[in-house]
């Protein structure tokens, strides 16, 4: 990587290169797709675009089911999941800030949210889920975050889903995969998930503003029995329009164009397997750096995220000073989330980051450490 320094002289740019867990850096080709001239939304051109994106999105989620693409961030679809799929009670498994959100959303929608918390840094395990279903069931659904961006923990969704199916087959399985989808495989059909949602601005490396959710037939059946589904995120209404390759309200046309360009890159140019392997490689580079520099991991061993590392700041580095230094070199990482600020810092290795770029970040962090 000797020439990496020369290839990336970001220091004189006004824009810091993003190594934060969202929004992630967006490639120029994707940004430029948004600058195309506008079209009407009730047109064949829009329907053709929508149909292409729909086919691509199904490949991304490994599903034959539909994928709703909404003009919202990911939280819009957490709310949609609760409003469409929960009649009364939902069990929310909490191991960080974003899994906590599921419960807050359920509260906000007037549903009964049973909170089952494990220590931050730990994954949600099938055992915890089975135990909770026995204690607090029956429930209309469970919620879980695949990749807790606040702690850098990934939970075993396939095993969790299998366990739910065994002990409570009527309970729907809602998964937030905002910071993992497109960075690590999620086999929606094979794992038997009911809703799996993501945002455009994380591992997908698109601009913020779109959310995607694969939704099972079981959820649509459930939705018929749930009142107060609202209008904008009513799955039955979205489904009716999806059949005609469009949406009930005006879609975010420029963002859809950007998504289409990026999905074409992911599926046809890079390839999903190569993309997952690259995320793995970037994670391992980061982990090796963490170990070699005498830091530790916030996430439990065996549950470390392939897309974001929460570094336990065992060396007591001044994280703000580190980021100030990185900014002078044209890049930025994230401090710890909420209560973890200062105690951890987070390095995102998701999206379209290359190993050369990752090396450059890690080398630059070494320069900072050498000054402390
Ligand atoms: C970023 C994030 C969210 C919030 O997504 P928005 O697109 O900001 O609504 C939810 N869950 C996880 C795991 C996240 O990383």
Image (cartoon, grey):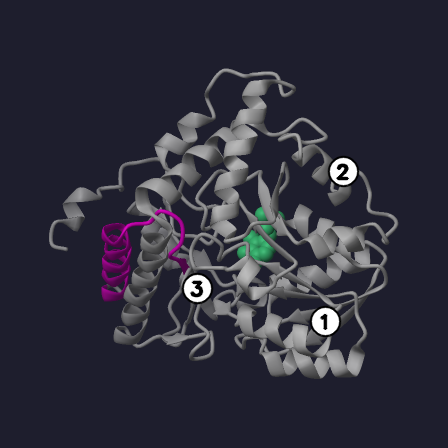
Secondary structure beneath disc 3?
strand
Q: CA distance from mark 1 to mark 3?
A: 39 Å
Query: Which marked residue is nearer to the observer: mark 2 or mark 1?
Result: 1
Secondary structure beneath disc 2?
helix
**Around disc 3, counting alpha carbons within 10 Å, would you say few (fewer than 14), some (14 to 19), or many (20 or more)?**
many
Q: Earlier in the sequence, mark 1 or mark 3?
A: 1
Rendered image: mark on residue 237: 2
Image quadrant where residue 296 sits: bottom left
Q: Earlier in the sequence, mark 2 or mark 3?
A: 2
User: Residue 244 location, x and y as percent?
Assistant: 66, 30
Query: Which marked residue is nearer to the observer: mark 1 or mark 3?
Result: 1
Q: CA distance from mark 2 to mark 1?
A: 26 Å
Q: Quadrant of the C terminus?
A: bottom left
Q: Earlier in the sequence, mark 2 or mark 1?
A: 1
Identify which residue is drawn at 50% across, 69% down: 154
User: Residue 24 location, x and y as percent?
Assistant: 43, 46
Secondary structure beneath disc 1?
loop
**Residue position marked by numbered label 3 in the rendering:** 345
User: Residue 276 location, x and y as percent?
Assistant: 37, 57
Q: Main secondary structure of the magenta part?
A: helix
- Give the answer, above or below, for where 249 lies relative to 235: above
**Residue position marked by numbered label 1 in the rendering:** 169
**Around disc 1, counting alpha carbons within 10 Å, would you say few (fewer than 14), some (14 to 19), or many (20 or more)?**
few
Q: Is residue 325 left or right of residue 20?
A: left
For the magenta stretch, what is the residue range? 346-370
Q: CA distance from mark 2 to mark 3?
A: 42 Å
Question: In this rendering, does residue 255 appear at all?
Answer: no
């Amino acid at each position: 990587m000797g020439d990496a320094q020369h290839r990336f002289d970001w220091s004189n740019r006004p824009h810091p290169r993003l190594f934060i867990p969202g929004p992630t850096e967006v490639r120029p080709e994707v940004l430029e797709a948004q600058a195309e001239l506008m079209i009407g939304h009730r047109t064949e051109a829009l329907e053709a675009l929508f149909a292409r994106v729909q086919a691509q999105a199904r490949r991304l989620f490994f599903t034959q089911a539909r994928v709703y693409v909404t003009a919202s961030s990911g939280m819009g679809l957490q709310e949609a999941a609760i409003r469409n799929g929960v009649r009364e009670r939902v069990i929310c498994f909490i191991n960080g800030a974003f899994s906590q959100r599921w419960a807050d959303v359920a509260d906000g929608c007037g549903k009964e949210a049973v909170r089952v918390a494990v220590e931050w840094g730990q994954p949600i395990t099938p055992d915890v889920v089975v135990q909770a279903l026995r204690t607090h069931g029956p429930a209309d659904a469970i919620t879980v975050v695949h990749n807790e961006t606040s702690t850098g923990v990934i939970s075993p969704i396939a095993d969790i889903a299998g366990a739910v199916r065994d002990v409570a087959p009527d309970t729907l399985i809602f998964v937030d995969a905002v910071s993992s989808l497109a960075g690590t495989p999620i086999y929606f059909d094979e794992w038997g998930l009911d809703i799996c949602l993501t945002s455009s601005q994380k591992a997908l490396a698109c601009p913020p503003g779109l959310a995607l959710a694969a939704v099972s037939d079981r959820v649509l059946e459930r939705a018929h029995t749930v009142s107060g589904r609202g209008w904008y995120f009513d799955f039955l209404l979205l489904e009716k329009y999806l059949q005609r390759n469009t949406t009930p309200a005006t879609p975010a046309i420029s963002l859809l164009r950007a998504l289409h360009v990026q999905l074409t890159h992911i599926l046809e140019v890079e390839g999903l397997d190569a993309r997952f392997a690259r995320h793995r490689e970037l994670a391992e580079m980061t982990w090796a750096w963490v170990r070699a520099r005498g830091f530790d991991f916030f996430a439990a061993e065996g549950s470390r995220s392939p897309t974001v590392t929460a570094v336990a700041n065992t060396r007591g580095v001044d994280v703000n000073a580190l980021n100030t230094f990185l900014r002078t070199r044209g890049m930025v990482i994230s401090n710890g989330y909420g209560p973890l600020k200062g105690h951890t810092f987070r390095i995102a290795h998701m999206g379209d980051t290359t190993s050369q770029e990752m090396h450059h970040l890690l080398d630059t962090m070494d320069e900072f450490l050498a000054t402390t």
